[in-house]
Amino acid sequence: MTGATTSGELRAHNRVRLLRAVHDGGAAHTRSRLTRDLGLARGTASVLVAGLAEDGLLHEEPAAEHTRGRPTQVPGPHPRGPIALAADVREDAWELAACELGGRVTVLDVRPHDGTPEGALGPLGEAMTGHARRFGHRVIGAAVALAGPVRHGGLVDIAHLGWRSVDVPALLGFSGSPIVGNDTALAALAEARRGRLRGVRVGLHLHVDFDLGGVLVVDGHPVAGASGSGAEFGHMPLTGNERRCPCGAVGCWSTDVGANALLRHVGLAYGGGRGREQAEHVLATSEEAVTANATALGRGIAALVNAHDPEVVTLSGHGVELRERAGQALLAACGPGLMAIRRDAPPRIEGSALGWRGSLLGAMESVFDAFLTTEGIELWRKNHPDQGLDTPDRQSVTHSTPTGKKAP
Amino acid sequence: MTGATTSGELRAHNRVRLLRAVHDGGAAHTRSRLTRDLGLARGTASVLVAGLAEDGLLHEEPAAEHTRGRPTQVPGPHPRGPIALAADVREDAWELAACELGGRVTVLDVRPHDGTPEGALGPLGEAMTGHARRFGHRVIGAAVALAGPVRHGGLVDIAHLGWRSVDVPALLGFSGSPIVGNDTALAALAEARRGRLRGVRVGLHLHVDFDLGGVLVVDGHPVAGASGSGAEFGHMPLTGNERRCPCGAVGCWSTDVGANALLRHVGLAYGGGRGREQAEHVLATSEEAVTANATALGRGIAALVNAHDPEVVTLSGHGVELRERAGQALLAACGPGLMAIRRDAPPRIEGSALGWRGSLLGAMESVFDAFLTTEGIELWRKNHPDQGLDTPDRQSVTHSTPTGKKAP
DNA sequence: AGGCTTTTGTTCACGGCAAGAGCATAAGCT
DNA sequence: AGCTTATGCTCTTGCCGTGAACAAAAGCCT
């Protein structure tokens, strides 16, 4: 958001601001509230909303609650408005969803896969293409979350699955040049927009699945690195172990935290994206393994808090359970690693509010981040002349809650 | 820079953009070039420049070189224009300078001190107050760089000097509510604006003095942390040492790199901000101590590159010499610590272009960052009516080069 | 030297935009 | 039923950047 510099761009800029406020507010704020929040005159808001409704971007419904005075409206997604496709590819399954402006999520498909690039991405790409055809011009983009570092152009490595420079866009074969993102970075993005990092200037988000990822969130944006692969806090040697990590380095923090570490701790086979159920069993039953995980997590958090001074640390994936089940061990390991000056007011360490749904929601947010720009909106307006009539159509999808439980 | 939302704010916004472009360009760009770069119509630029000249913010001089056509002008600092006071307080001396729009630096004073809060900050505060009185309304703010973490409200800790929660603004007694910043973060800011991190989206800056500081630079801004004390990459346990650090944690990377580490390596006394000359002697003569420092530096850099994926890593302070004298050892230690996928295209590791002047320049930039906003400029315009006549006055200062050698 | 070309600075009519006032609307409250 | 309150709509006003026409100040060519 560079800001308008000509009077012509002013209108476009305010259109984006209004749509962004609707989206970030979950399509729950009233028009009068939005007008106040954005500092607009009522007349200006009137013209803006009317224009956006005509463009097929917004649709107003009467507000449910009144106090007094003329009742206000609630701008929400247009029944034929933009849809973002979002997918979360984990080591053993993927999930595909359609998302409206405001963040309402409709799960379209959930499927297990065999862990190979072709086995995972081929069927996903077909599903994406099929649903995109069904939604037609409403589709504004797609994003895919993956459990490994993403390099320029969508090349992905997942060391413990044996993925080397996997060309994700090519294997998907989806014609809309999908955004390819790291699951941790996207979970952090979701946390920043709709979770416990909302409104936080500097936050640290850690995502625990088979291994550990982490990223800094500054002013609502994960710090993604030069080529988008900067969410790899797990690959710093913060705990003093000497293990060789599948990533090629030695002593990575990531090898001490997550499902793989849990399995290793009780002597079970691990790696290759297998053993989710067994790991959950360990998590539920082995106090010792959980404590070891939480201790390693705490030691690393201390180092990162020293370095970055975040206001809040959030944990997603298994991190939620580690926080709940072994919070004491976590904090006990964290304290001694802190600089003395950090001990007066250490950051809160909280479980994510979004659970396992963060990466998917983050994928959605990344699509809307690209769309909710002057360029994105002008493109839509150009391609959607006279959407006008504001009649609901049959295409509208059935809805689920935006947060949810872990996929099978 | 949130961007304008009303036609009234447009003018203010474009004023700021123009002044920012002049400042960032070192007051060296021609008006025609600035007009093109900012995408303005010639007429708009005309009105803007005329207005800013009248406000005492800009002064145009004919450009030195012509090609053809009507010769253009070069907008630069007004002879009675804004001045930023910038100070760099190191463990054994401080330096005070006045800076104009465009970044021209005039050193006002350089003095050694005894390392106590009162001994260092008292005389500096007096000098600042004296010079501020001399410059009068031209002073738009002051900033002070310090070699330790800065907490909310300007409380500073420098563990190895024994500074605990030193209230810097209070001890300075300077009436302009000075900005208090960490030397590493400010050196990184200068590097981002006028050094090797210019135009870099994600960079890593490391500052080596008595110990080691480091910070991530994203889109031209150091990531400063919740309370401004986020430039402490040195206090992560990245090298596997077991030493207790004066900061209160154990195994800090910072204890392996810098003047203190050099002195310790050859068995000399260290700490307390003493021994700069001896450390320089070690740096110049002891191959072994230098190699040990560079090796530890390289190992830590590898961890940070894994985590953050920066485009460039820059080194300031002693880091410049470590890079020159022991680049091989540095790279040799860095390589094995990298993730395999980072080895194809590792980031450049470069010495700073600003040498020891970075923290001072960063302090200047932080003052101008606060000034070059719509609020800052409107405030100046309110307080400087009819500056008009564009006649140079006697108050103008003598100038030195913006970059320079280390202070004694 | 004189005229032509090229580039930049200045001025001004024009169109677009948000602000704000006045009015209309649709509730709750008495 | 009438009053109060808050919101939506319409229209006028003032501000701003644009772009064209014109002026200015050089370099270039004959």
Image (cartoon, coloured by chain):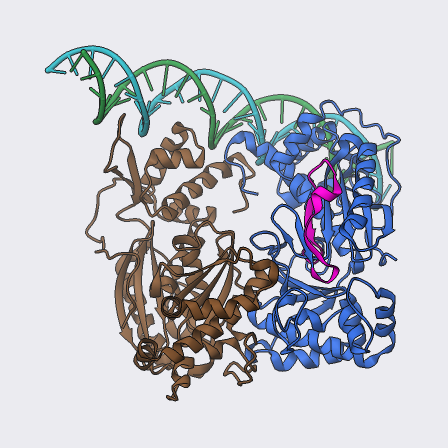
Chain colours: A blue, B brown, C cyan, D green
Q: Residue at x 28, y 62 (%)?
A: B404
Q: Is residue A297 visible?
A: yes
Front residue of A302/B137: it is A302
- How many numbered circles are shown? 0
Q: A95 above or below B277?
A: above
Residue B256 higher or lower than B348, as above or below: below
User: Residue A400 versus residue B11: which sits nearer the camera?
Assistant: A400
Q: Position of residue A262 (x, y in %)?
A: 79, 73
Q: Is residue A326 above or below residue B380?
A: below
Magenta region, residue range: A159-186
Q: Is residue B160 above or below residue B65?
A: below
Question: Picture quarter containing residue B391?
Answer: top left
**Residue A56 on image: x %, y %:** 75, 30
Q: Quadrant of the C terminus of chain B?
A: bottom left
Left or right, residue A6 beside residue A22: left
| Residue A288, image x, y percentages | 80, 81
A393 magenta-colored:
no
Q: Where is residue A121 shown, x and y percent of the image?
A: 78, 47
Residue A177 magenta-highlighted: yes
Instruction: Name the residue located 75 percent from the left edge and 79 percent from the top edge.
Output: A292
